[in-house]
Amino acid sequence: MGEELVIRIHPDGTVEAEVEGACGPDCTGLLDPFDRALGAVRERRRKPEYYRQGVRPRLREGGR
């Protein structure tokens, strides 16, 4: 699964953006252009995925 930016606009006009499928600083990097376009960020909450490092599959030799 690739990275996905989920944007919610609430009835009171507040905007919430969330990143799915990315870990660590990649999350905030995906949000940077969005943050700059909207202006000041009132609150930033980091999900547990932010603190998890990206995992890359390891190849095993000999099919073991």
Image (spheres, helix red, strand yellow):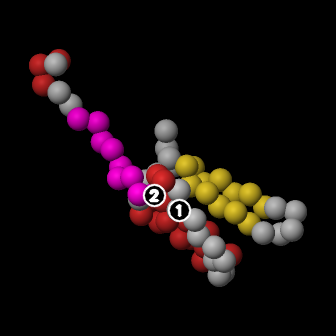
Q: Where is residue 34? Give x, y as percent.
A: 61, 69
Horizontal and vertical percent for residue 55?
A: 33, 44
Relative side of 8 to 1, left or right = right
The extreme right residue here reads: 11
Label of residue 46 in the image: 1
- Relative to residue 64, is residue 35 depicted above or below? below
Question: Which residue is depicted at the point 65% across and 61% down?
Answer: 17
Q: Please, which residue is most extreme toward the top here?
A: 63
Query: Most extreme residue toward the left, as rendered?
Result: 62
SS category of the residue bearing label 2: helix
Q: Residues within 10 Å of mark 2 (few under 14, many from 20)?
A: some
In the picture, residue 26 is in which quadrant?
A: bottom left
- Image location of residue 59, percent across then percent down: 21, 31
Residue interval drawn in magenta = 50-58
- Which residue is at a point 83% across and 69% down the rendered structure image? 13
Reading the image, the residue beneath label 2 is 50
Q: Amino acid at mark 1?
A: Arg
How many numbered dots are placed on residues in this image?
2
Indicate left or right for 59 with 29 as reference: left
Residue type marked 2: Tyr
CA–CA distance in space, label 2 to label 1: 6 Å
x 42%, y 63%: residue: 25
Q: Which of the image's four quarters has the C terminus? A: top left
Q: Are marks 2 and 1 in contact (CB under 8 Å)?
A: yes
